[in-house]
Amino acid sequence: MPEAPIRARMRPRGPDEQHRAASPLELLFDLTFVVAVAAAAAELAHSLASGHYAVIGFLQVFFAIWWAWMNFTWFATAYDTDDVAYRLLTMVQMGGVLVLAAGVPAAAAEADFRVVTLGYLIMRGGQIVQWLRAAVEDPDGRRTAIRNAVGISLLQVGWLIRLATGETTTLTFVCLAVLELTVPWWAQRTGETGWHPHHVAERYGLFTIILLGESVLAASNAVRATEVSLAMVVVAAGGLVLLFSLWWLYFLQPAGAGLEANRDKSFIWGYGHYGLFAALAALGAGLEVAVEQTSHPLPISPTATGFAIAVPAAVFVVLLWAVNWPIVAAPLVRPSTSIAAATLITLTPLLAPYGGVQLVVVLIATVCVLLVTVTLLQTVARHSPTDCPVIAGDINRHPGEQNHE
């Protein structure tokens, strides 16, 4: 791997660059989001365990986390120079993530968004400087870069006004969040910024793994804080099987080839991941509460705890099909199968009064295992025995490329 230059001109990287992969800097950047996601999930778990159900606050904080990560990811796939200035600005954004994470408890407990907003502004400030640099050094993409910088800057003023006036309501958040989502679309109308489909797909996959890891961490933290019992072991084991099944489903159909063939659908695919990612983070919180409930009574009922696990899992299953549908001609997870699985998952908490939360976790995990099994069997049925893909990486290969090694 070549050494990072001291100074490099910021020009677009080729969208068809061979062997493009996540850089060590991108991986380090993602690690700071481990802290932010863990803080958001921990506060959601605490609110659920106390019977407060602060879901709206969680979704607001998670939007800030996801949106900052997503903007960095798409900028990096286009303009990653990896020189000193680029690295330092990335470090500034990483600092903003940590500041945001520090403000999550106050935002969840007292609706005090001052520190969260400050962290968000630091993250977005670094991104604004990156776009301004791109505007100066890339004449062909100057108008698009300036539009991004101006749009992001104006929205940051809006967040500051929201905080200064005390209008930190859900309505003002939704209005500003929608405007944030429109900035890239508006900026791209003057010219599309180049991006690497396989690199983007890899980055989203890595963030998915981070969120799955957060769920494992949340459950393990609860296990350490409780006395070992059969119910606790069942919940922990069932949760692990559930998370493994969701991992299998997500990576069953790589998105790189679909994004390459349907670049105009990238907004739908990328934005749809907010729901997928939030569902995985919320699932970790639900599993943490479930483990805790096996050791001592909580204000939340076992049925409600079951829904705290079932709803995120069902949302993930449905959205997984929904985000892949625009970019893949024939999604491996069929809509009828995903809807049927999501319906069964959503109904399982109704059995909590008869078998406790451990029964609910086991049943949800069982449904997800069956979904993986059915999807694999349906995939096999679409291919002849001679060219059937046996691993996820072979699914998007041309049939003529099979068995020629």
Image (tube, helix red, strand yellow):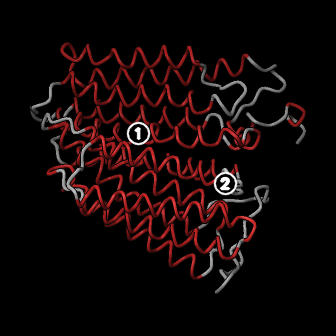
Q: Position of residue 242 (x, y in %)?
A: 42, 31
Q: Residue at x 19, y 37 (%)?
A: 48
Tell me: 34 left or right of 54: right
> For the point 49% across and 67% down, which residue is it?
28
Q: Is residue 222 above or below residue 315?
A: below
17 shown above or below 221:
below
Instruction: Kindly report the distance in space between the C-alpha atoms of the residues bearing marks 1 and 2.
Output: 22 Å
Q: Is residue 125 left or right of residue 329?
A: left
Q: Which residue is mark 2?
A: 199
- In the image, residue 253 sits, relative to residue 103, either above or below, namely above
Binning the other alpha carbons within 10 Å of mark 1 as few (below 14), some (14 to 19) or many (20 upward) gives many
- Residue at the image point whose x is 70% and y is 79% from the top: 9
Look at mark 1 in the image and give the residue it sits on: 280
User: In percent of the image, x 29 and y 31: which residue is there?
Assistant: 235
> In this figure, what is the number of numbered marks?
2
Q: Nearer the viewer, residue 321 or 117?
A: 117
Look at the image and tell me in which quarter the N terminus lies: bottom right
Mark 2 Cα-neighbour bin, 10 Å: few <14, some 14–19, many ≥20: many
Q: Are marks 1 and 2 in contact (CB under 8 Å)?
A: no
The C terminus, quarter of image: top right
> On the picture, is 99 further left or further right than 4?
left
Residue 229: mark: none
| Secondary structure of the residue carrying numbered label 1 | helix
Q: Position of residue 363 (x, y in %)?
A: 36, 19
Kind of residue sitting beneath label 2 = His
Q: Earlier in the sequence, mark 1 or mark 2?
A: 2
Q: What amino acid type is highlighted by mark number 1?
A: Leu
- Between 135 and 96, the residue placed more toward the observer is 135
Residue 206 percent coordinates (x, y): 54, 51
| Residue furthest bottom in the image | 6
Measured as percent of width and height from the top left, residue 223 is found at 24, 44
Q: Secondary structure at mark 2?
A: helix
